[in-house]
Image (cartoon, rainbow, N blue to C red):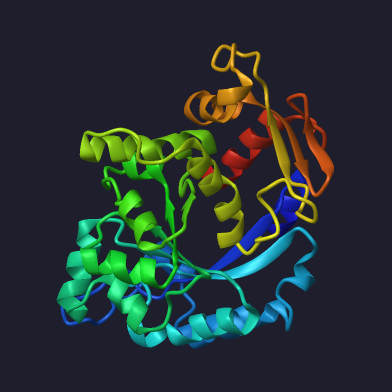
Amino acid sequence: MITAAGEAGIRITLLDTCYLSGGLNPDGSPVPLTGPQLRFGDGDSEQWAARVAALGADPHGMLGPRARAGAAIHSVRAVPPDQLHPVIAWAQRYGAPVHAHLSEQTAENLACLAAYRVTPAEVLYDAGALGPRTTVVHATHLASRDIELLGGSRACACFCPTTEADLADGIGPARALASAGSMLSLGTDSQAVIDMFEEARRLELGERLATQRRGHFTAAELAGAATMTGHACLGWPDAGEIVPGALADLVTVTLDGPRLAGTSAATALESVIFAATAADVRDVVVGGRDVVRDGTHLLIDDVPGALSAAVRAVLD
C-alpha cells in the first residue's frame, strides 16, 4: 500500500488493524475467526504488536517522508477488552494515531452490552484508549454518556456519511459531539463514493434530516473537518491549511463548471462545500510537487486503465 501510494504521488497513513475475533458471544467470549476472516487475524494483540514492531524503532521515519504508521482497533467486537492494551501501548510509545470503529450499528451496542454490561465507548474509555490521538469512526449510535466520554477525552470522531447512508446505519450525533469537545473529521470507509465535498455537506444535511432544522455547521467548520482535522487525526498535524511552515498539500477547484459558475469571492467557500464534487478538482499538489495539473495525472499515464486493472486484480 505504501509503494502504491508513492507511485500515485499521495501521502498515506498506514493504520495497521488489530482484528482478533468475528464478534461477541453473550458471555463475552470472542467468536473465532473462520474462513476468509483468518487472513486478517494475528492470533492475539501481543502477536499484533510483535508484527507491527517490524516497522522498526521509528515507524514514521523508515516509511519515507510521505508515509506514517498508526494503529487501529477494528472494533470492540473484534478486539476483546483484555487484548486492547498492547495496541494502545504501541501507539503511545510512538505518539501514533489510534482509530477504532465505534457503535456503527445498534447490533454492536447490544452485543457489547450483553457481553460487558457497558457500551463500546465505555469499553474504550475504561481501557485508556480514548484521548486526543484517538479517532472513533462512525460513532452513529451513542448514548449521552458516550458523548460525554468522547468529548471530555477530546477524541476525534470520523463520520462517513455516504457509507453510513449506503449501509442504512443511521445518522450520528455530529453536532452534539462537537459541542461536547470532540473534533470532527470525515472519511469514506468504502469505495462506493470517494468525494470529500459530498461527505462534508452530508454532515450538515444529516443533522437537518434528524432535527428538521438547518444551520448546524458553517462551511468553514465543514471545510476544517475535511482538511485540518482530517490530517491531524491521521498523524499529520502539520498539514491541512495554507500557513507558513505547513506541508504544501493543496488542491484547486475550478469555478467555471456548471456547479460553481457564478461563484462570488464573498461566498466561495460556501459554494464549494455545498455544490462542488470531486470532479471539480483541477490540480493536486503534494509536498509542493504537482501530481495532477489541469485535470491530468502527471505520474500515471492511463488513470482509467490503471484503475480498471486494479479492480480486476482484486476480483480475480
Picture quarter with the C terminus: top right
Point 57% across, 78% down: residue:
91
Residue nearest the observer in this picture, 3 or 148: 148
Rendered location of residue 108, percent (x, y): 25, 64
Point 79% across, 64% down: residue:
64
Rendered location of residue 79, percent (x, y): 38, 76
Rendered location of residue 173, percent (x, y): 29, 52
Residue 228 lies left or right of residue 135; in this view the side is right
Q: Is residue 282 above or below residue 291?
A: above
Residue nearest the observer in this picture, 159 or 73: 159
Residue 105 lies left or right of residue 295; in this view the side is left
Residue 197 lies left or right of residue 126; in this view the side is right
Residue 291 quadrant: top right
Point 63% across, 22% down: residue:
265
Residue 193 shows in this picture: no
Residue 260 quadrant: top right
Residue 192 lies left or right of residue 61; in this view the side is left
